[in-house]
Amino acid sequence: MRHIVVIGGGIVGLAVANELASRGDRVTVLEKEGRWGAHQTGHNSNVVHAGLYYKPGSLKATMSVAGNRSMVDFAHEHGVPVEVCGKLVVATSEEELPRLHALADRAEANGVPAKLISAAEARDHEPEVACVQALRVESTGIIDFPAVCQALVARLKDHDLRLHTPALAIRSRAGKVEVATPQDVVRADVLVNCAGLHSDRVAELAGLTPQARIVPFRGEYFELRRTELVRGLIYPVPDPTLPFLGVHLTRMLDGSVHCGPNAVLALRREGYRWRDVSPKDVLDVARFPGTWKLARKYARTGLEEVLRSFSRKRFAASLARLVPEVREDDLLPSGAGVRAQAMRPDGSLVDDFLVQGAPGQVHVLNAPSPAATGSLEIAKHVADLTRS
Ligand SMILES: Cc1cc2nc3c(=O)[nH]c(=O)nc-3n(C[C@H](O)[C@H](O)[C@H](O)COP(=O)(O)OP(=O)(O)OC[C@H]3O[C@@H](n4cnc5c(N)ncnc54)[C@H](O)[C@@H]3O)c2cc1C
């Protein structure tokens, strides 16, 4: 029986561990925090994406479409709260229509059922929405991703799952991989790196030169006081030149409505507030040549995002384009999440999921949204790679 050590107890690491265990491997999971899913997995929008945005044939497209189904099935089987409520992507001006139509074509290419509907039909779903046309996507859902992690942990009860256990050093020795933790050294046949915001650093610890570096982008949320303004999920038409979907309104399973997330450069990899600063992380980003190329490319958008981060009024104005009734005093500060987005030295952001292999090792180096949706599919892909 093979012994596999997985670094990172977010949804991807736990899904990989579960997949390997179901194929007969013995698994050790090392998580540095005191709870599972403590970072990206526990700070996101909790949306089961349908898979309409991503380039046809990409890992993101195939794994989110398949993951949408496998995640909902998993939730039903394990008593995890989930609701397939559908969503609206709304064009708020005539200029946005070509992009909305392109999105409808992409949904079709990805096999995602989606229908262009009129403004009046959109208001049947969302009475407060303002748009000229919308795309209705039925298979989008809302879920509790931390509860998915708990269900995965329960399935792994016969395996070695360790909280408060950072991987500090890694070396290969006599055909085995050794991972030093503060308590002991774990010896295994294969290493899987699912360390999210630290995945590039863990890859370096293992002697790999990662093809890309992690840049942390914080996404801040507000909660909508007047929840009656939103019934489900309302998204803008995304700008295809930007890596994120734009601030949106999401009804959560508990009935609250989350607004956001925006996207600002975080000054610490796990920095959930502006005052969370790590000189090491800032220097890392500043020294990477890609950062400066990225900054030049997105200078204007970046500045707007920073201004919006400090101005509730601007945040409300972005939301009011979708739902005009939203006002500044409707927004109550809520949490934030930090995305682990990989960037190449030329400043381009890695669009697709990125998994890099080496003898006895598999590294998940880019697993941003919709990786929580696609986690059970990413797990199958990674498990296959541990045998190649
Ligand atoms: C604001 C925001 C909104 C999002 N919305 C959605 C959404 O609605 N739907 C969706 O599908 N996706 C969404 N995502 C993306 C999704 O959250 C991530 O793709 C997913 O959670 C990635 O999981 P992960 O396991 O790779 O990373 P993480 O959850 O970050 O887990 C990595 C783990 O590795 C641990 N770790 C790191 N280094 C070490 C070490 N040296 N030793 C031991 N442990 C270590 C960390 O502590 C962490 O727990 C969103 C992300 C953000 C930030």
Image (cartoon, rainbow, N blue to C red):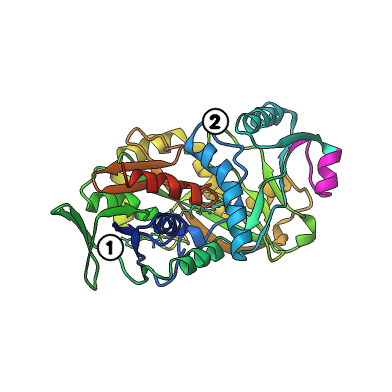
> Is 35 placed above or below 355 here?
below
| Residue 219 relative to residue 340: left or right | right
Q: Quadrant of residue 312?
A: bottom right
State yes or no: residue 39 in magenta: no
State yes or no: residue 130 in magenta: yes
Residue 66, percent across and down?
Answer: 56, 43
Q: Residue at x 69, y 49 (%)?
A: 319
Q: Is mark 1 within 8 Å of ligand 1?
A: yes
Image quadrant containing the N terminus: bottom left
Q: Residue at x 34, y 54 (%)?
A: 198
- State whether residue 260 appears in this view: no
**Residue that sits furthest to the left in the current view:** 174
* Amino acid type, mark 2: Pro
* Relative depth, front residue between 342 and 178: 178
* Relative depth, front residue between 134 and 138: 138
Of the numbered discs 1 and 2, the one sitting upstream in the chain is: 2
Residue 145, percent across and down?
Answer: 55, 60
Residue 82, percent across and down?
Answer: 65, 59
Residue designated by label 1: 167
Image quadrant containing the C terminus: top left
Q: Which residue range is magenta in the image?
A: 120-135
Q: Quadrant of ligand 1?
A: bottom left
> Is 32 placed above or below 200 here?
below
* Amino acid type, mark 1: Ala
The disc label shown at residue 56, or none:
2
Residue 72, percent across and down?
Answer: 62, 54
User: Distance of mark 1 from mark 2, alpha carbons?
Assistant: 36 Å
Q: Residue at x 50, y 58 (%)?
A: 337
Classify mark 2: helix, strand or loop. loop
Q: Are marks 1 and 2 in contact (CB under 8 Å)?
A: no
| Residue 233 relative to residue 17: left or right | right
Q: Residue at x 61, y 64 (%)?
A: 80
